[in-house]
Image (cartoon, rainbow, N blue to C red):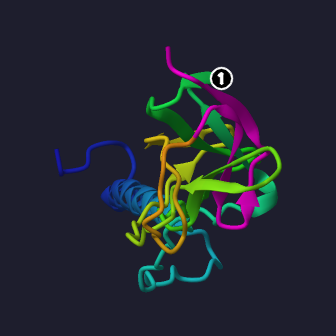
Amino acid sequence: MFDPNGPLPPAVYWRRRVLAIGAVVLAAVLLGWGAVAMVGGAAQPRGAPPPRPPGPPVAVAADAPPPQCADPAMRVVAEVARPEFRVGERIDLSIVVTNAGDRACVRDTNRMLRELTVSTPAGKHVWSSNDCYSESTNEQPLLQPGQSVRNDVQWSGQTSTPDCGADQGRVPAGEYQVVARVAALKSSPTSFRLVAGS
């Protein structure tokens, strides 16, 4: 196999074999180099800057708390369970606070900030839910647009004064009105009447 046979001198056959082997080796080297160049080029394009090391973690701010409800966005209403009661009956009254704005907000409805006041149509003070009352509460509901918070009060039908005077008495039959207040916001008056018992 390695001994050249043929009409030409043996040296010619040896040169041909060396050239053939060299060509095979060169082709293998070129293929290997091309494969390495392609893989390296896909990983990082020539001339591209080296990748930067990762930086420190960035703190993401938490969602901001909802704002306080502005007075123009609020609606306060005084409600009476019925338009007429008998003298001596307990009378169910309510303060209804509604977010009339277009975004969610928080409203402070602390017990000392809200009040129901009953008076005569002429404006004479008859009774208030805050007369002789000094207990504070922490009430700050989150109100979605159109959402309401309601606070119910049962009035005994007795008069009251801010100084807790001892001359309280039963309210006589007649026409009355109730106004709701939350801080500086006041409702329109809601009318009701007391009638003498049978």
Question: Along the line of sight, which residue is nearer the eye, 47 or 127?
Answer: 127
Residue at left 73%, top 60%? 185
Left or right of 140? Residue 180 is right
Residue at left 25%, top 49%? 4
Q: Is residue 196 visible?
A: yes
Left or right of 169? Residue 173 is right
As drawn, 41 above or below 126: below
Q: Is residue 143 magenta?
A: no
Question: Along the line of sight, which residue is nearer the eye, 76 or 22?
Answer: 76
Q: Quadrant of residue 145?
A: top right
As drawn, 51 above or below 114: below
Q: Is residue 177 magenta?
A: yes
x then y, percent, for residue 10: 31, 57
Question: Along the line of sight, which residue is nearer the eye, 162 or 190?
Answer: 162
x then y, percent, for residue 51: 51, 79
Residue at left 82%, top 58%? 72
Q: Name the residue that disc number 1 marks.
A: 83
Figure disc tally: 1
> The disc labelled 1 sits on which kind of residue?
Pro
x then y, percent, for residue 96: 61, 42
Residue at left 49%, top 69%? 62
Q: Is residue 82 visible?
A: no
As drawn, 162 above or below 191: below
x then y, percent, for residue 180: 66, 50
The secondary structure type at the circle numbered 1 is loop
Overall secondary structure of the magenta stretch? strand
Left or right of 183? Residue 189 is right
Q: Which residues are magenta?
A: 172-198
Estimate how packed mark 1 is, as few (under 14), some (14 to 19) or many (20 or more) residues with alpha carbons within 10 Å. few
Residue at the extreme top of the image, as rendered: 198
Question: Along the line of sight, which residue is nearer the eye, 80 or 156?
Answer: 156
